[in-house]
Image (spheres, helix red, strand yellow):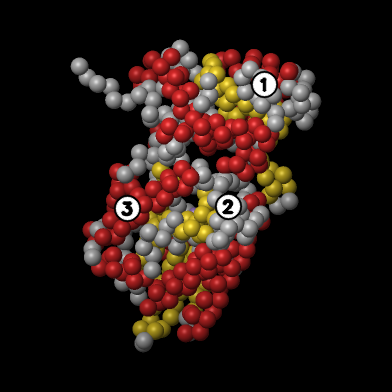
Amino acid sequence: MKIIKKTYSGIFRDGGAGSFSKRRYRERRNKLMKKEKSLMAITGVPYGPGGKTVWSYAHSPTYQEPTIMYLTGINQSNVILLLDPESKISKEILFVGRKDRIMEFWEGVRFGVGDKASLKEVQLITGINDVRDIGEFKDVLKDRFSKNKNKSLGTFWYEGIKRGKKVSITTDHNYDFKKKLAGWLRDWKAPKDALKNIMSNHLELRLPLDQYDLKNAKKAQEITGEGFKAMLKNFHKFKNECQVQGFLEGKMLMNSPYGLSYPSIVASGANATILHYMKNDDPICKNEMMLIDFGVRWMTMHADITRTFPVSGVFNPMQKILYEIVLKGQRQVEKKARSGVTIEELNDLCWNSINDGLAKKFSALGGKYKLRYKERPHGVSHLMGEQEHDGDPFRNYASKPMKDGWMISNEPGLYGEFKIRLDGKMYDETIGIRIEDNLVMTKKGCLNLSNIIPKSVGAIEKLMADS
Ligand SMILES: [Mn+2]
């Protein structure tokens, strides 16, 4: 007899909390209910990989809407969470599809209404006892809304301020769901302002990492770092960018079933001046530098790392000067980053340091350069967490004091054409250098999760010398 190995474990992300997962998710939902105080409905992704998307874009093992992932740990499409803090009988209802054996023949096991064993697993991990058929959602919502004291309904969508104007992300499932709710509320003759956005309260709770998140974030760094070191040690074998990508991603994926944080950028020479270079198919040449931006997930946490190194294994004198200018900017950001400081302050510090370094360490030696941007190529930091780029997508958070437990990237860069004569030799290269670590804020300073991933000139040259 054959043993079927997989049950529902592939569906849930217990966040590494194991037997505490139920308590963890319940606490998160309770905190949200305490802040919002009123009825809420939040949707997961409407379909999984392969549904409605083209095949070539289909696969990622973790695909849930992060809001639902954070509140329930469920990695399955077509779920809705209803939170009703006023209710005496049932404050939390999870709506799911019916158990569908035919679909499971194609896509593997799912939990669903009509299957007691799977619902027991849902209750065990999420702590939500009331699980119902998603077909009943509208009727239940109507009933709950009619009893709601504030005549309000909260839901999640991305909204922010861009160039002084209020804007929303209107292209995702969250906004589709919001529009659907708004239509129902109109039909039910609800007050015009009944629909509320829970984004800011939700993100305020979600952004600080808890102890399990932190453990998982560290694990993601370890696997990412091991992949990088193994790749550098084998670097002499690679003839083009895609071989580097294949080896690096293979090593990372061998050690994590949760997928990559994002498709890697593997850019040699001038390609590294394209910030989101994705082609990854050019041959690599001996005198160039190579920039790689890569990382893996562990559970729901992401690593987002960039390293730049010389293809030859040894930095030439110009590469070394430029690299150390960027590294200095990065070290200054790390020294300053802590709770209470804003990302805008880190930006000022970082880009001033790099522009200053270019003047004092490069131009002063007779170097000439042409940058591919004015003053700043990009932000030095973005928020991280349930998503590789977390927080509001308009980055309104950059002007707000950071809080304990926030995870951010620290990624100064330098992109352009550089020319200098050193020790009688002329150097002339188009170079992109970025060095990226991930930091967690505390009151006393920051924790650099990426300090296990080599980045000094000496450490990189040593690793490549062993290759
Ligand atoms: Mn980044």
Amino acid carrying mark 3 in the image: Gly
Percent from the top left, x then y, of residue 10?
38, 30
Distance, label 3 to label 1, CA atoms, is 50 Å
Amino acid carrying mark 1 in the image: Ser
Distance, label 2 to label 1, CA atoms, is 33 Å
The residue at 52%/76% (across/down) is 357
Say whether residue 254 is left or right of residue 140.
Answer: left
Q: Which mark is residue 73?
A: none
Amino acid carrying mark 2 in the image: Asp
Query: Within the image, what quadrant is residue 104 found in?
Result: top left
SS of the residue under disc 1: loop
Q: Which residue is mark 3?
A: 227
Percent from the top left, x then y, of residue 197?
68, 35
Q: Quadrant of the N terminus?
A: top left
SS of the residue under disc 2: loop
Viewer-nearest of labels 3 and 2?
2
The residue at 79%/28% (across/down) is 192
Q: Which residue is mark 1?
A: 87
Percent from the top left, x then y, of residue 110?
41, 22
